[in-house]
Amino acid sequence: MAKSKTQFSCNACGNVTNKWSGRCDACGEWNTIAEDTPLSSGPSNATLGSAKGRSVPLTDLRTEETPPPRTMSGLDELDRVLGGGLVPSSAILVGGDPGIGKSTLLLQAAASFASKGLKTIYVSGEEASAQVRMRAQRLGLTQAPVQLAAETNLRDILTTLETEKPALAIIDSIQTMWADSVGSAPGSVSQVRAAAHELTSFAKRKGMAVILVGHVTKDGQIAGPRVVEHMVDTVLYFEGERGHQFRILRAVKNRFGPADEIGVFEMTGKGLAEVLNPSALFLSERGQPSPGSVVFAGIEGTRPVLTEMQALVAPSPHSQPRRTVVGWDSGRLAMILAVLEARCGIPFTGLDVYLNVAGGMKITEPAADLAVAAALLSAREDAALPADTVVFGEISLSGALRPVGQTENRLKEAQKLGFTTAIAPKGGKAQVGAGMKLTRVADLTAFVGDVFGAG
Ligand code: TYD
Ligand code: MG
């Protein structure tokens, strides 16, 4: 009998090694390597040489089949992030920090899909059925035709799905699932992988959609959702800051729709409420125009979203001044500070810099560069931008401003929310609606001169 080998795998990225170490070589995370049993089934390379496989039937690309219709849940924010409703036999992963509201979201989604006539089974491996029912009561969903199971044994779950034949199964969470064919403990990389593989291939074979919940884990013993990202069609992350009521559902991978799409929700006493106009919400806490505050006209997926960039610049008591960023990339901030210094002669040496995207949003668009530069300058010069102005544009290392896409959409959204002026890079075509003034700027130096009368 072959000796069973020990292997170690990283719970953050799934990298497999044959020795333990404190830091994963593949992803650089600390304390994420744990012992794991390798998947034993299947022929080894040695037997593959002699044993014969069956020849797989091949087909061509032509098709007369029309794609099966998607099902809309009626929760517009969720449907849009899915790329326009739920695709039959698709596998979806919903990741997020513990306690962010994944179970709440998916119970609401289960109820919505079920009341649209989709046979839906919700399997909870974390809570007892009574707890799930209590949550449903709190959410006012007790009448929805969702079927519940509290189970962690994968074999039993698959048998149940086989007989019940639902159109949608929700597995909360993949880390609690336990496949008896795998020797290691629930939550380990091989268990999570095996369970995700079994569930997604079952879904494809039987024409059932499956939604897997995955907790983002900060340390050691439990595998994170990243190890199953490649197995599913759609990866959504549910994000939010503690202390904020807003929750953002973001598509990071979608075989059936645009990635980078977001849906915005608000956590209330009665579950998650959809936020249909996020711009209004993100700007609602904005008071009088103040130095360091600039409104950025951004695009999230297919939708324009306005957010407020806040900067604070203060003399630093430290020999190494602080650079603190919330909701944006800190490398990008360093780049903009460097461009301001090198191209416009505005140094930030000896100054602490804090940058915050209001409302708990995370912005990844390069179009936010100019808004960030404006917020930094405004904070440094202690001069507020006019309250009715929005800013967008990408900054290149030369200090030139690059035009960005969807200018018209950005302007329309800004106008809808009562803004009258936009500052944007030169170039690109855009029709500006009546009542909106568009100031085009060629480079950062001109921007500094135009807006702050310096440089
Ligand atoms: P939950 O969905 O259990 O999070 P997850 O599944 O991601 O771990 O959400 C838990 C939090 O949501 C908890 O702190 C309570 C809060 N909550 C509300 O504020 N209102 C509600 O109606 C519900 C059901 C939960
Ligand atoms: Mg949960």
Image (cartoon, rainbow, N blue to C red):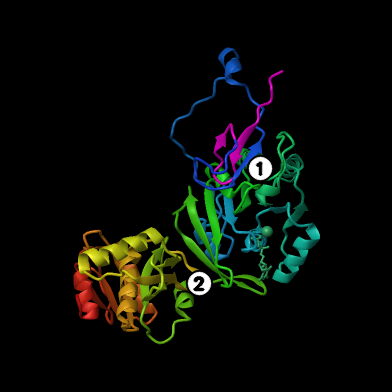
- In the picture, the quarter occupied by the C terminus is bottom left
- Name the residue located 28 percent from the left edge and 63 percent from the top edge: 338
Gap between marks 2 and 1 measured at Cα: 39 Å
- Identify residue for label 2: 276
* Amino acid at circle 1: Ser
Q: Mark 2 or mark 1, which is nearer to you? A: 1
- Identify residue for label 1: 188
The kind of secondary structure element at disc 1 is loop
Left or right: 178 as drawn, with respect to 239: right
- Residue 147, labelled with which disc? none
How crowded pointer 1 is (Cα within 10 Å; few <14, some 14-19, many 20+) is rated as many
The stretch of residues the image draws in magenta is 1-19
* Amino acid at circle 2: Leu
- Name the residue located 67 percent from the left edge and 45 percent from the top edge: 187
One can see residue 406 in this view: no
Find residue 247 and report its image quarter.
Answer: bottom right
Check residue 17 for magenta coloring. yes
